[in-house]
Image: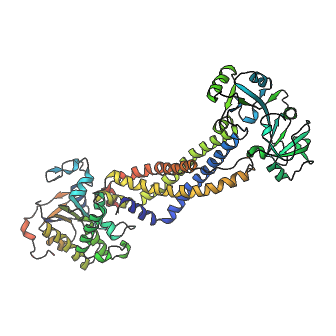
Amino acid sequence: MTALSQTLSSLRHRPGRVFLTALGAALGIATIVALLAVSAGATQTAGNFVHLGPGELGLFQSDASDPTTSVLPTSLMDRLRRQPWVSDAMGLQLLVSAVPRAASAIVFGAAADGFETRRMVFSAGHVYGSGNEVVVGDVLAGQLHLHVGDELTVSHRRMAVVGIYHIGISEQDEGAFIPLSTAQAISGHPGEVTTIVLKLSPGMRIPAAKRLIAKRFPGLMVITDPDEALRAGANGQLIENVTLVIVVLALLIGGIGVMNTMLLSVIERRTEFALLSAVGWSGPQVAGLVLAEGLVVSVLGAAAGIVLGAIGAGLLVHALGAAAFVSPDVTAWVLGRALLIGVLIGILGGLYPAWRAARLSPARVLAQT
Amino acid sequence: MAPGELVALTGASGSGKTTLLQLIGSLDRPTSGRVLVDDVDVGALRRPAVYRRQTVGFVFQLHYLLPALSVRQNVELPLAAAHMPRRERAERSNELLEAVGLADRADSLPSELSGGERQRVAVARALANHPPLVLADEPTGSLDSVASRQVWRLLSGVRDRHGTTVIVATHDPTVAEHADRSLHLVDGRLMTPEPPERHRVPGFAA
């Protein structure tokens, strides 16, 4: 008989208690998995605000709390274009919650001849010409049943749909593009853009360009990949912070739950542990038995929590109305962290009961029974 | 006490029989004085668990079998503490259960056994690590006469076959009569010990 088989036998003897304790841990871990998955999804989403090809950089205001709140002067574009290492620069104005019928759609203000705009492949119509025209991503058009010739309201402004496009970037295919000047007028920031996308000159490497920007254009945040985009995004950051708080809470609540159960178990089974001590089990051996029981319960809870959390993540973004905006991403890293948290809950919750069990005086306990 | 003796500790409740056994078995430490077992002060041991594992086998009035474990698993508890490999543990537990007449109940749970059978399992558990010293605290106190006789035969048989020293705390005067010698405790003090051969009953051992 091994310590493990004894642990499992003891747990099998108390199935109800094991189930309830594991359920407590499972709910905490399910919440963590759901939030981590949404957070991972938000990372991807933030990276998709701007489509960056090879040799391209996204510039945001460095102290902006969210990519969409960044404000950069359009004059900066001209200064950047004059740099020998810059091939082209294009300003984008991002408008969120601007389409009443699709709250999560983002409206991009961009010059019709910008290199970002030229990536559009039109399935119907063409790019906008006048300030009151809009082109709609094919996903959004499908959702709202829009066709060329229809009207779309953008921030109380009725605009004519002149084209349906596909780019292949979910954020942009689920949104719409309007002329930059119109977007600036709607946002109340004429002469300003949210972000500037830079196309570097051939031969110019991104790290060198980043160093030059940091030196010559202070106050700018340079984004080259989705992780950096997340750092600039308050939404993603908020989810990360909330997740951290929930992780700490889950560790505390789950740990206290496991501790409570294991402590109760130690008190109930004092005679058992005293007997083990009498037949030669050392303090660490007795403590290890209690720790192993706590660990098995919490890992069972973690396994159930991972399944619940993976399902719950999808339900969460639907409940928040952010299904189009954020796709939960249940990665191996998310699952690994959840399992690690389960193990930590077991260890944290089991330590004190294990210590109590190891310190029981067999003489006193056996004399009382 | 000499090695291989079967000694009965008698005395009224509260006279100190259990306390003395717990001190000898290093389950408790003396507040004053010393307890020497083979010239080792067992009250000052740094690792009493090792001493209990290697030197002492306990049999209590209550069997204290773990309810979630099978009979075999209960017998193997001291062996698991000693990190004995699985195969050797199985061989040893088979041997012990055979000796106490419960080989066919190895996979039963304690709740499926009679009181006498449980106490025989407890005796098997006490003997698992071949201890040179067995301490039995009222081992027949909660058994009927038939079961009591069986347990007694086991304990005295261990002494006869392996030269194990057995100290038994008991209220039962007939049990004391079958011991090599009897030590009487009154209020924690040892009264006149009687000579070793006096109470020896030849042929009692199983």
User: Looking at the image, can residue B109 be seen?
Assistant: yes
Q: Is residue B16 above or below residue B61?
A: above
> Looking at this view, is B22 or A14 the one in front?
A14
Q: Percent from the top left, x then y, of residue B71?
A: 33, 70
Q: Split into 4 quadrants, where in the image is the C terminus of chain A? A: bottom left
Q: Give me the residue at 43% from left, 49% from top.
A: A351
Q: Is residue B112 above or below residue B168?
A: below
Q: Give me the residue at 38% from left, 62% from top.
A: A6
Q: Is residue A85 found left or right of A137 in the rendered image?
A: left
Q: Residue lying at the far front in this picture: please name it.
A: A202
Q: Percent from the top left, x then y, of residue A131?
A: 91, 35
Q: Percent from the top left, x then y, of residue B131?
A: 20, 61
Q: Give me the residue at 33% from left, 66% from top.
A: B73
Q: Is residue B58 found left or right of A350 in the rendered image?
A: left
Q: Is residue A185 above or below residue B44?
A: above
Q: Residue lying at the far bottom in this picture: please name it.
A: B146
Q: Split into 4 quadrants, where in the image is the N terminus of chain A? A: bottom left
> Looking at this view, is A343 or A152 the one in front?
A152
> Looking at this view, is A58 or B199 the one in front?
A58
Q: How is the image coloured?
A: rainbow
Location of residue A240 (image quadrant) = top right
Location of residue A269 (image quadrant) = bottom left
Q: Residue lying at the far top in this picture: please name it.
A: A216
